[in-house]
Amino acid sequence: MARKAVVLVSGGIDSAVTAAVARSEGFEVHALSVHYGQRHDAEIEAARAIVSSLECAGHREIAVDLASFGGSALTDRMAELPRDREAKEMAHGIPSTYVPARNTVFLSLALCFAEALGARDIFLGVNEVDFSGYPDCRPAFLRSFEALARVATKAGVEGEEFRVHAPLLELRKADIVRKGVALGVDLGLTRSCYDLDRAGRACGHCDSCLLRRRGFEEAGVSDPTEYQ
């Protein structure tokens, strides 16, 4: 019988490929998506399409209003997003698109779901290569969360181990695109843009769009993204 795994699915390329990796490793994938007050709902709509296409065992959606705390351009629709930045500029400092403690909250929700489900494996699509400025996309954070799970859960104190998998952690975007193609992921279903228009078209200028476009170009794969 396949082991169960909770996979955080946001609607972007990284989480879609991560879900496909979990499935390819023989896990029964239970997807979890979070409405956290992000600027648009297209991410969640994309997550639903991805989960359906990958034939996941289940999909839970939960709402946590991180926008009520502020502190991020991703939850403040009036905030100015970084645009047309060079790769070197993206690689330094913590950008305004960082959402305070977001991955800590997401992993906590995934841990809750996993323990209730009887799963001991959690997958998320964090990557420290393209976004080195995000503190919650680093190995030290992931290992620390595993240590927390050992002392913060019934399963943990009874001797069971929770494992946080981040299979894309050290991959560049081009490698992630190639892996997605190899695993049969429909990358056209994914959404990466921080500032999609009402028709769901990408802006082509935010950090995420620029990294996505460069990833497809370097991978030699046609970009299915519809840009404004």
Image: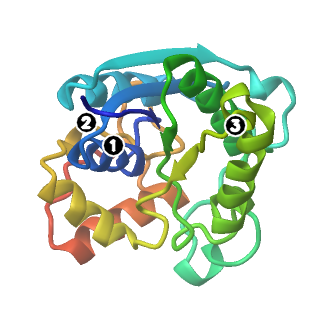
Mark 3 vs 1, N-terminal side? 1
Left or right? Give the position of 198 relative to 142.
left
Percent position of residue 106, x then y: 64, 35
Q: Do labels 3 and 1 touch, CB within 8 Å? A: no
In space, the residues marked 3 and 1 are separated at their CA atoms by 28 Å
> Badge 2 local density, few (<14 within 10 Å), some, or many (20+)?
some
Residue in the picture at 53% in, 79% down? 87
Vertical comparison of 25 with 90: above or below: above
Provide the residue designation for mark 1. Answer: 16
Classify 10 Å Cα crowding around label 1: few (below 14), some (14-19), many (20 and above).
many
Q: Are marks 1 and 2 in contact (CB under 8 Å)?
A: yes
Give the residue furthest to the front: 158
State the SS at label 1: helix
The residue carrying mark 2 is 189
* Distance from Cα at disc 3 to Cα at disc 2: 36 Å
Tell me which residue sits at (50%, 26%) in the image. Answer: 33
Say which amino acid is labelled 3: Gly
Q: Is mark 3 on a helix, strand or loop?
A: helix
> What kind of element bears circle 2?
helix
Query: Which amino acid type is shown beneath numbered disc 2?
Result: Leu
Q: Is residue 97 visible?
A: no
Q: Which residue is drawn at 33% across and 43% down?
A: 16
Pointers 3 and 2 in contact (C-beta within 8 Å): no
Sequence-wise first label, 3 or 2: 3
Q: At which x and y percent is residue 150?
A: 73, 43
Vertical comparison of 178 with 19: above or below: below
Is residue 57 placed above or below 24 in the rendered structure? above
**Horizontal arrangement in the rendering, residue 165 relative to residue 219 (left or right):** right
For the C terminus, the image quarter is top left
**Tag of residue 156:** 3
Of tags 1 and 2, the one toward the viewer is 1
